[in-house]
Image (tube, grey):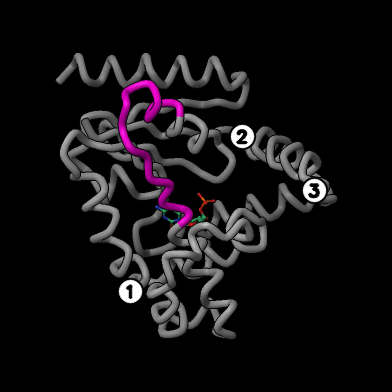
Amino acid sequence: MIIAIDGPTASGKGTIAKALAAHYGLPHLDTGLLYRAVGRQCMLAGGNPDDPEHALSAADFPGSLLEDPALRSEETGALASRVSIHPGVRAALLARQQAFARQPGGAVLDGRDIATVIAPEAEAKLFVTASVAARALRRWSEMQQRGESVSRDEIEADLAARDERDRTRAAAPLRQAAGAALLDTSALPIDAAIAAAIALVEQQVAAR
Ligand code: C5P
C-alpha cells in the first residue's frame, strides 16, 4: 500500500507519516529532506538558490548530506523552498521518490506533491494542514527546546512566506489532490491526530 501525505510545514504531517509507517510496517520517506539537501548543497557550493542552474547542480548532492543535522534548521527550510520552485530540480528528484513509492509492499511518503505528482495512484491520500498560528506555535516550541531563540512573529512571517511560495509556484504547487482526505490538526493533540489519520486511511482503503 502507498500512503501519500501532503501539507504545509509544521502541519504535523511528518509525525503522522512516521506513525502511519510504524502502524502499517511500511518504510517512510520524508521528501522535504531531499529538497533541504539541495538547498544546503547549493549554499555550501556558494550558489544562488534562485538560479535554476545553480540549484540543479546541487541536486547531485552527496548521500551523506542527508544525515547533516543542519538540514533541520529554519534557514535550510527556507533555502529548500527556494530551490524547489525550479522544474529541473523537481525532475531530478522525481525518479528517486517514485522508486521509493513503488517498492514491493509499498511505502509512506510525505511532502507537497506526493498525491498530485509522485504517486497519484496511492491507495490512501491525506492532506494534513493547520492554521498558521498553530503551526508557528509548534515550530516555536521545538526551537525553544533546542535552545534557539526566535520570536513567534518571525516564525509566523516565515511560515506564511513559505506557504505562499509553495502554493503559488508553477511547478507542482502545494494543493489538496483529488480524492485526498483533509485532516486539520490545529486543535488536535498529536495522539488524536495520529488516530484520526489511521481512521482516514482505513476509510479510504475500505472504499476502494
Ligand atoms: O517539508 P519541509 O519543510 O522539510 O520542506 C522544505 C521545503 O521543500 C518546502 O517548503 C517545499 O518548498 C519543498 N518541498 C517540495 N516538495 C516536496 C517536499 C518539500 O517542494 N515534496
Question: Closest to the observer: 133 or 45?
Answer: 45
Dot 1 or dot 3, earlier in sequence: 1
Q: Is residue 99 left or right of residue 155?
A: left
Q: Position of residue 124 (x, y in %)?
A: 27, 29
Residue name at image x 55 percent, y 26 percent: 185
Dot 2 or dot 3, earlier in sequence: 2
- Nearer the camera: disc 2 or disc 1: 1
Q: Is residue 205 left or right of residue 160?
A: left
Q: In 3D space, how far apart are the residues under numbered discs 1 and 3 (Cα atoms)?
A: 33 Å
Label drawn at residue 62: none
Q: In 3D space, how far apart are the residues under numbered discs 2 and 1 (Cα atoms)?
A: 31 Å
Asked whether disc 1 touches disc 3, contact meaning CB atoms under 8 Å apart, the reply is no
Q: Position of residue 92 (x, y in %)?
A: 30, 69
Disc 2 CB within 8 Å of nearest ligand 1 atom: no
Mark 1 = which residue? Answer: 88
Q: Is residue 110 above or below residue 92?
A: above
Quadrant of image for the N terminus: top left
Mark 3 = which residue? Answer: 153
Question: Closest to the observer: 190 or 23?
Answer: 23
Q: Is residue 142 above or below residue 126?
A: below
Residues rendered magenta in the picture:
19-33
